[in-house]
Image (spheres, rainbow, N blue to C red):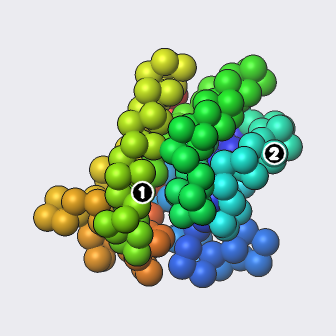
Amino acid sequence: MIAALGDSITEGSPGYDTRLGGDEESQWQHWAARAHPTLDFRNYGVYGQRTDQIIERLDDCARGAGVLVVQGGINDIAQGVPAETAAKTLRKMVRRGKDLGLRVVLADVLPWNNGWPAAEADIRRLNGLIATIAREEQVPLLPFHDTLEDRDRPGRMREEWTSDGDHPSVAGYRRLGELAFRLPD
């Protein structure tokens, strides 16, 4: 079982609520499971959470899992938490997952159209720190940012890949699940 732990990017949007249901196509896990039918995902994303809130749920969410996907950080940036603080918490999550005997995967932060250009430097700084964590902790990095970034408008998602300027559209989630997701060795 793969435990996907994170914020609203993991939970799914537009309109998906893990507690109430909704359009499962608005989750990257749905598309990853369609591409790899033997995968079993459990969604532990919670809208609006910062990394310090996500880590509090890690042990409960990881119970029974063999793989842990760690995703988060945009809400830290949106709420003025320094990228370095968010990165330290993400590293703690990666290490905790490994301590629990899980294979761990780390996702980077998406472009944020509604936060552009003010948040772009912080997102790029955090993504650089996330890449360093993945390399140093020897865990795969899911390139969520680059998978959805508009090459003609750096720092932003292509319009068809976002539902509201904050979250991916169904087409964006499909790209994340089919193109960005991969299991650790």
Q: Is residue 42 visible?
A: no
Instruction: Report x, y in % for residue 157.
Output: 31, 66
Tell whether 90 sits left or right of 168. right
Q: Residue 146's spot in the image, x, y percent?
A: 30, 50
Q: Quick check: 58 left or right of 160?
A: right
Task: Identify which residue, 23 or 14, lies in the foreground.
Answer: 14
Residue sitting nearer the eye, 100 or 129: 129
**125 is higher (above) or lower (below) than 92:** below
Which residue corresponds to the image point at 81% horizontal and 45% vertical from the top-left? Answer: 56
Residue at label 1? 110
Identity of the amino acid at label 2? Glu
Camera sees residue 158:
yes
Image quadrant where one finds the N terminus: top right
Task: Give the amino acid type for the residue marked by disc 1 in the picture.
Answer: Leu
User: In terms of depth relative to the viewer, which is nearer, 179 or 86?
Assistant: 86
Image quarter for residue 38? top right
How far is the residue under mark 1 from the one under mark 2?
22 Å
**Helix, strand or loop for disc 1:** loop
Furthest-left residue in this view:
152
Closer to the N terminus: mark 1 or mark 2?
2
Placement of 141 over or under 15, stated as above or below: above
Residue under the point 72% across and 55% down: 44
| In-front residue for pair 135/11 | 135
Residue drawn at x 35%, y 52% as measured from the top left: 121
Q: Quadrant of residue 103?
A: top right
Q: Which mark is residue 39?
A: none
Please tell me how crowded label 2 is: few (under 14), some (14-19), or many (20+) other residues with Cα within 10 Å.
Answer: few
Q: Secondary structure at mark 2?
A: helix
- The x and y percentages for residue 93 are 68, 34
Q: Residue sitting at 46 percent across and 72 percent down?
A: 166
Residue on which disc 2 sits? 56
